Image (tube, grey):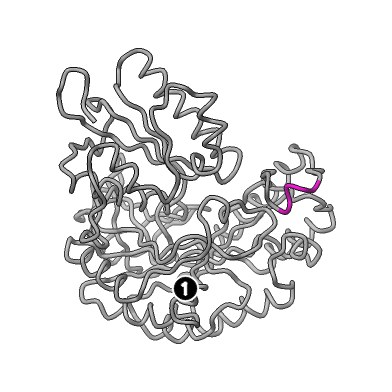
């Protein structure tokens, strides 16, 4: 692919959506670079080819993706760029409709069509680049995708339609990939998947998340391992002694429960009851003393009653998750819930979401206040204004709380760990001084 002037292309990749998309874009850029395609990783200013890696998970994400495509389509019409390529989840799911409506896009690719995308540049997929990619995160942490797709039947989720069935990466491949990242200076890895607890069952005939964590924890130089997106139904309890005994596995678990009403858990097809959910959460807390639990909730699912919501709300106030996020239900065609009537008004969905978050603010503040006076190991990510900004082991990048240390009174190199005495706390941030 060349410009009309004959000059070589310069490509900029725009990444939208979740951390799984971040990894996909990093792999894509690594492959483009290996095929001698010039990249502008940080800016679209000098690029003549734009690749938009889209998200199609919920309405807001789809709207952002479409608006971004239209923004660059206008740039193409104005001859500010030569080529516009779209890939990712939205393209996978709505390619035919989008192709007829947005005619300025040159090519559309799905989530598993990277070789075909590379072919448009005269390149090919380099299988010898196993695990190597062009990182877009800060130089000290990276996301690592341990599997692709999902086999779960959740009523509201379109991920299997966009990402396919669950496919694990072999343990040896992941050990090699993470070892390579550590050799580049990575100190923290976030293990991600649509359902990390299902890891290994398709390759080894049984769940192997515990063995994977054990093997990764032995990688010299890897200081923090963080586990995301653990499905509560049939949670593999053999993971807990590994997490408890390995000092470089963060005492942190992202376990999306989505709801707590038996009625809604059944309608959401979560494969778990209210009581079993509580049992799992309690076993995790007992098995890994001091663990911080993060969860995600969905409110406004079809047929969610006020009683269902109150069951959820009361549980959140009583159980006190350390970290929590809430989504409002988005009607997705070709999902099980998409065949139901979207009968909870948008205003009610928003009210329920805000009610949960107001209660969670109190929970988060209480937890943060409990840290005042304690010494915490903190990994510093950036300098922002007058503060160095970092995280404890209880916090993942982008989604959780942060530690702020005044730069004029303290000094730390970005990407380094430091011990911090916590001096103040707010609902979503804590403040301290480097020891």
Q: Nearer the viewer, residue 398 or 151?
A: 151
Question: Against 404, is 62 above or below?
Answer: above
Could you say which quadrant of the image residue 47 lies in?
Answer: top left
Regarding residue 90, the answer to whether it shows in the image is yes
Q: Quadrant of residue 75?
A: top left
Q: Residues within 10 Å of mark 1 (few under 14, many from 20)?
A: many
Most distant residue in the top direction: 78
Q: Residue at x 54, y 60 (%)?
A: 323
Q: Where residue 140 appears, x then y in whole percent?
A: 25, 58
- Relative height, residue 105 to residue 392 (above, below): above
The residue nearer to you, when weighing 243 against 9, is 9
The quarter of the displayed image where residue 14 is located: top left
**In the depicted view, which residue is nearer to us: 24 or 252?**
24
Instruction: Examine the structure image and report whether residue 2 is included in the region drawn in magenta.
Output: no
Tell me residue 122's x, y (percent). Answer: 23, 39
Residue denoted by label 1: 199
- Residue at screen point 54% across, 25% down: 100
The chief SS type of the magenta part is helix
Residue 309 point in image, percent of width and height: 78, 56
Answer yes or no: is residue 406 visible. no
x and y percentages locating residue 305 in the rendered image = 84, 53
Q: How many marks?
A: 1
Q: Quadrant of the N terminus?
A: top left
* Range of residues picked out in magenta: 336-340
Query: Is label 1 in a helix, a strand or a loop?
Result: loop
The C terminus lies in which quarter of the figure? bottom left
Q: Residue at point 73% right, 44% down?
A: 349
Horizontally, residue 322 falls left or right of residue 420, namely right
């Amino acid at each position: 692919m060349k410009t009309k002037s004959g000059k070589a292309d310069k490509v900029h990749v725009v990444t939208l959506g979740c951390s799984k998309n971040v990894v996909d874009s990093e792999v894509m850029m690594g492959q483009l670079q290996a095929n001698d395609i010039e990249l502008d990783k940080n800016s679209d200013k000098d690029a003549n080819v734009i690749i938009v890696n889209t998200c199609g998970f919920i309405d807001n994400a789809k709207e952002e993706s479409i608006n971004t495509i239209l923004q660059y389509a206008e740039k193409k019409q104005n001859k500010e760029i030569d080529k516009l390529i779209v890939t990712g989840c939205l393209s996978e799911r709505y390619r035919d409709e989008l192709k007829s409506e947005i005619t300025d896009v040159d090519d559309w690719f799905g989530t598993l069509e990277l070789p075909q995308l590379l072919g448009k540049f005269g390149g090919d997929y380099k299988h010898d680049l196993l695990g190597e990619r062009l990182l877009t995160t800060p130089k000290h942490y990276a996301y690592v995708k341990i599997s692709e797709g999902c086999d779960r039947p959740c009523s509201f989720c379109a991920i299997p339609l966009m990402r396919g069935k669950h496919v694990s990466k072999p343990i040896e491949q992941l050990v090699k990939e993470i070892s390579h990242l550590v050799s580049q200076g990575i100190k923290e890895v976030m293990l991600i998947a649509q359902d990390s607890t299902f890891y290994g069952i398709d390759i080894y005939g049984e769940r192997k998340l515990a063995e994977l964590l054990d093997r990764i924890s032995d990688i010299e130089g890897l200081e923090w391992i963080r586990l995301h997106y653990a499905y509560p139904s049939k949670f593999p309890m053999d993971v807990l002694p590994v997490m408890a005994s390995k000092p470089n596995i963060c005492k942190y678990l992202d376990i999306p429960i989505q709801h707590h009403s038996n009625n809604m858990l059944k309608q959401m097809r979560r494969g778990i009851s209210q009581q079993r959910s509580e049992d799992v959460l309690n076993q995790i807390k007992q098995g890994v003393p001091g663990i911080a639990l993060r969860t995600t909730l969905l409110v406004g699912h079809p047929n969610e009653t006020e009683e269902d919501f109150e069951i959820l709300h009361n549980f959140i106030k009583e159980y006190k998750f350390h970290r929590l996020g809430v989504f409002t239900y988005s009607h997705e065609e070709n999902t099980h819930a998409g065949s139901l009537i979207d009968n909870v008004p948008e205003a009610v969905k928003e009210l329920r979401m805000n009610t949960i978050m107001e209660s969670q603010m109190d929970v988060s503040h209480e937890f943060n206040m409990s840290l005042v006076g304690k010494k915490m190991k903190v990994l510093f990510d950036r300098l922002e204004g007058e503060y160095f900004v970092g995280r404890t082991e209880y916090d993942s990048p982008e989604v959780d709380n942060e530690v702020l240390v005044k730069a004029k009174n303290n000094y730390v190199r970005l990407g380094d760990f430091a011990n911090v005495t916590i001096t103040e706390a707010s609902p979503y941030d804590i403040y301290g001084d480097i020891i």
